[in-house]
Image (cartoon, rainbow, N blue to C red):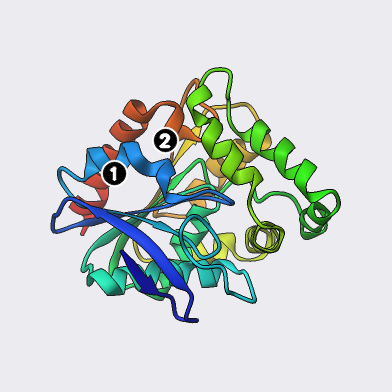
């Protein structure tokens, strides 16, 4: 299925199942909606499950001049409008978390909750570091993609690593600059502006980012952090059963709060 974002860019998406509540799955940086196949099958039995390709990714068009979290948020918002979803929970992996926040701010009448998947903690360095991607782009993207996926434990994910490495430079650099800037200037204020519950399901690890999230949670009344052990960054791919169980619980909390 297709629709058009607010700036005229064609957005591709798919729908599985039907239900009063919509669950919209949003992929991360240089990724695609296929990463959510386990969740589409599971949650499509009880909800209207939707997965989209953001502009510049997957099967969506790339004719956009400026890459921002707000523009990606409009990609999600246009899908909500096209399907006339009345009550949606937005689930975003990595960069998809900030995109979900911006979409929720854009369509407060349609969104009842936001859930991150290993999100809200790592904003890909500062803008200067992101701009360095342009130098030896292909080699850097290959290194990044192979580092993000645990191909030894999950060789079936090689197709996703290859797709990430093949991303266009304009989209990859533009989106990475945008997420760096959003993380450093907008994150806490944007989440505070939300009037819906926010949850995030993180990989359990020992680093400053996860600790900062736990310190942040008490300052944001709607915010709650969960952790999954023995997974990498792609929590929904590495252990879909455990991730889906946590997400089921988050969805129940959010729906019951409305």
Q: Position of residue 104 (x, y in %)?
A: 39, 67
User: Mark on residue 49?
Assistant: none
- Quadrant occupied by the N terminus: bottom left
Task: Name the residue at 23% across, 43% down.
Answer: 43
- The residue nearer to you, when weighing 29 against 190, is 29
Q: Indicate the secondary structure of the residue bearing disc 2.
A: helix
Q: Residue at point 63% right, 26% down?
A: 206
**Where residue 58 appears, x then y in whole percent?**
49, 55
Q: In this image, 164 relative to 111: left or right?
A: right
Label 2 or label 1, whichever lies nearer to me, is 1
x, y (%) of residue 19?
A: 13, 55
Q: Is the residue marked by circle 2 packed among few (<14), some (14-19), or many (20+) residues within 10 Å?
A: many
Question: Percent x, y for residue 13?
Answer: 35, 60
Name the image quarter holding residue 78: bottom left
Rendered view: 100 above or below 207: below
What is the spatial separation of the Cα atoms under label 2 and label 1, in whole angstroms?
11 Å
Q: Nearer the viewer, residue 151 or 106?
A: 151
Let me know if residue 184 appears in the view: yes
At label 1, counting other C-alpha atoms closer than 10 Å, the crowd grade (few under 14, some 14-19, many 20 or more) is many
At x 48%, y 53%, the residue is 97
- SS at mark 1 in the image: helix
Q: As drawn, is 98 to the left or to the right of 123?
A: left
Asked if residue 109 shows in the view, the reply is no
Query: Residue under circle 2?
Result: 236
Q: Is residue 54 left or right of residue 135?
A: left
Can you say which quadrant of the picture contains the C terminus? bottom left
The residue positioned 56% from the left and 66% from the top of the image is: 69
| Count of numbered circles on the image | 2
**Residue under circle 1?**
40
Closest to the observer: 217 or 65? 65
Placement of 72 over or under 138, stated as above or below: below
Mark nearer the N terminus (2 vs 1): 1
């Amino acid at each position: 299925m297709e629709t058009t974002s607010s700036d005229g860019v064609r957005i591709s998406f798919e729908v599985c199942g039907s239900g009063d509540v919509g669950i919209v799955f949003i992929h991360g940086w240089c990724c695609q909606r296929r990463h959510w196949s386990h969740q589409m099958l599971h949650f499509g039995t009880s909800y209207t499950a939707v997965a989209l390709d953001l502009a510049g990714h997957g099967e969506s068009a790339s004719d956009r001049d400026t890459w921002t979290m707000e523009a990606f948020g409009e990609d999600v918002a246009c899908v909500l409008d096209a399907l006339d979803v009345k009550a949606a929970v937005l689930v975003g992996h990595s960069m998809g978390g900030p995109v979900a926040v911006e979409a929720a701010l854009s369509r407060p009448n349609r969104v009842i909750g936001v859930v991150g998947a290993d999100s809200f903690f790592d904003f890909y360095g500062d803008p200067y570091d992101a701009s360095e991607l342009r130098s030896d782009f292909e080699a850097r993207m290959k290194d990044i993609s192979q580092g993000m996926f645990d191909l030894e434990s999950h060789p079936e994910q090689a197709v996703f690593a290859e797709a990430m490495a093949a991303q266009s430079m304009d989209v990859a650099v533009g989106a990475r600059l945008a997420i760096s800037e959003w993380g450093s200037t907008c994150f806490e204020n944007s989440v505070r502006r939300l009037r819906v519950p926010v949850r995030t399901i993180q990989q359990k690890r020992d680093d400053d980012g996860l600790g900062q999230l736990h310190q942040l949670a008490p300052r944001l009344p709607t915010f709650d952090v969960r952790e999954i052990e023995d997974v990498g960054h792609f929590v929904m791919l590495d252990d879909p059963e455990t991730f889906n169980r946590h997400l089921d619980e988050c969805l129940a909390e959010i729906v019951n709060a409305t």
